[in-house]
Image (spheres, rainbow, N blue to C red):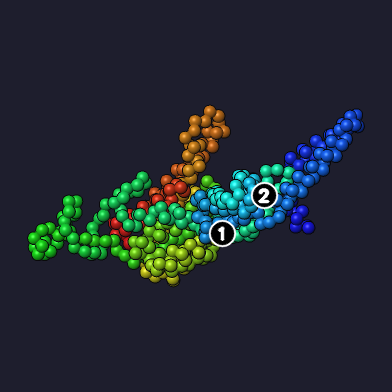
Amino acid sequence: MIKFFKALYLNQSFFVVLFGIAAIFLFSYWMPFLYPIGWLALVLFFLVFIVELSLLFSSEGITAERILPEKFSNSDENEVQLKVKNNRNLKLWVELIDELPVQFQKRDFLIRFNLKPGEEREETYFVRPVARGEYFFGRLNIFTASQIGLAKSRKSVCENEMVKVYPSFIQMRQFDFLATDQRITRPGLKKIRKIGHTLEFEQIKEYVSGDDARTINWKATAKQAHLMVNQYQDERSQSVYSVIDTGRVMKMPFNGLSLLDYAINSSLAFSNVALKKKDKVGLIGFSNKMEIMLKANSRRSQLKLIQEHLYNVETNYFDTDYNLLYAHLKKRIPQRSLLMLYTNFEHISGLKKRLPSLKALAKNHLLVVIFFENTSLQELIESKPEEIGPAAHQTIAEEFAHNKKLILKELQQNGIQAVLSKPQELSLDTINKYLEIKARGML
C-alpha cells in the first residue's frame, strides 16, 4: 500500500475538477436544485478516478531502459539513449526525468511525449563532461498518465549506474589520419620539409614525378631498364614521453576545463599518433612528487594503460619540483628520449627558477616545453579604453602577453624546443611539433 501511494501523483486537473464540485455544493446553499447534481458529479468523479487508477496500476504498463556508453569522452558531446515501450492497449502520456550526475548540475531534465498501444520509442540526449572521473547516474523516472488525465503513476529504473569519463578519445580519433597519410591537408597542419635522410630504408619502387632525384637507385635502375628509387620511412621504436605538470599552475580554467585537462587530452591524441608511427610511448606525471611513471612501450595495450592512468588525475596546489623530475628521469630513463613537457609559465621569473633543471634535462633528452597562451587577455588587449582604469588593466594584460613571448625566446636561446599554444589548439600544435621532429630527424 505504501508503495502504491509513493507511485501515485495527482495532476492539476484532479484538483480543478474537485474545486468545481466544491463550488457546486457551495452554490447549492442558495440554489438547492444544485445539491443532488453536486453529489452525482462527486460520485462520477470518483468512479472515473478509480477507473484511471486501475488502468495505470493494473499491470506492467511501461518498460524503460537507459543505454550508456562504456565511457565518456571529456570535453566532448556524449550520447545517452533512453528506450521506452508501452505494453498496454491504451494511449499513454509519458514524462521522463533522468537524474543526471551531480557534476552536470542540471536539475530541469524533462522529456514529454505520448505512446500508442504497443509502441516503442527511443529518445537521445547529449551530455558534455568537463572533468574526468566517475559519474553516477541516479534513477530514470517514468511518469505515465492516461487520456483521462486525473492522475499519473511513477516508475523508477536504472538506479546508480556509473560511467567513467576518460581524456578525450574522440579528439584522439580525429587526429588518427596524421599517423597514416601525411599528404592529407587540413587547416592548422604544417607542411614540413624533410632534411637529410635520418630515415630507415623501406623499399625500392618505380620513380614517379615528384620523387627526390637523390634517392635514385642506379643498380636497380640498370636491372629494370627504368628509373627506380629508394623509399624511406621515419625511424621507429624511439622512446617518446608525455610529461605532465600536475602542480598548481595547471589549475587555471579555460572554457570550463582546466589547463591540466587540455594537457591530458593533448597527450592522449599525441600518444595515439606516436604509437601508429611505431614509436614507444610513455607517461610521466609530477608535481612536488612523482605521480605517474609509465615506461615507454609500443604494445597495443599501451594506449589503454595511458587512459587508465589519466582518467582520474587531478591538480594539486603544490609548487612543481623540476629537480625531482630531473633526478627521477636520470635514474629511470637513461636512454635519450623525446620529452613533451606540458606546463605553464605566467612570468619570466617563474621560468628563471626552473631553467637550470630544464637545461639539465635537455642535455640528456630532446626536451619540448609546451606552455599556454592566455587567450582570455586578447579581448582586453584589443579593446579601446576611454578611462584610466580600463587602460591600466589593458597595460597589465599587454605585459602578461609580452612575458609569454619572452619565455618562448628564453627557452629557444637556451637550446630548448618550445611551443606556445592556445588551449583549444594544443593537440594540433603538439602533434605538429612531433611530426616536425620526426621529419627533421632531431631525436
Label 2 CA crowd tier, 10 Å (few <14, some 14–19, many 20+): many
Tell me which residue sits at (60%, 49%) in the image: 117
Q: Is residue 275 left or right of residue 61?
A: left
Q: Distance of mark 2 from mark 1, alpha carbons?
A: 25 Å
Q: Is residue 303 left or right of residue 210?
A: right
Residue 266 visible in the shown view = no
In the image, residue 397 above or below residue 263: above
What x and y, as percent, mark residue 424? Answer: 46, 47
Quick one: SS at disc 2? strand
In the image, residue 396 above or below residue 244: above
Tell me which residue sits at (86%, 33%) in the image: 34
**Residue 420's disc number:** none
Quadrant placement of the C terminus:
bottom left
Tell me which residue sits at (31%, 55%) in the image: 181
| Residue type, numbered disc 1 | Val
**Depth check, front residue: 257 or 396:** 257
What x and y, as percent, mark residue 329? Answer: 44, 67
Q: Nearer the viewer, mark 2 or mark 1?
A: 2
**Residue 163's disc number:** 1
Quick one: SS at disc 1? strand
**Depth check, front residue: 337 or 159:** 159
What x and y, as percent, mark residue 29? Answer: 91, 32
Tell me which residue sits at (68%, 56%) in the image: 59
The residue to which callout 2 is attached is 143
Q: Quadrant of residue 235?
A: bottom left
| Residue type, numbered disc 2 | Phe
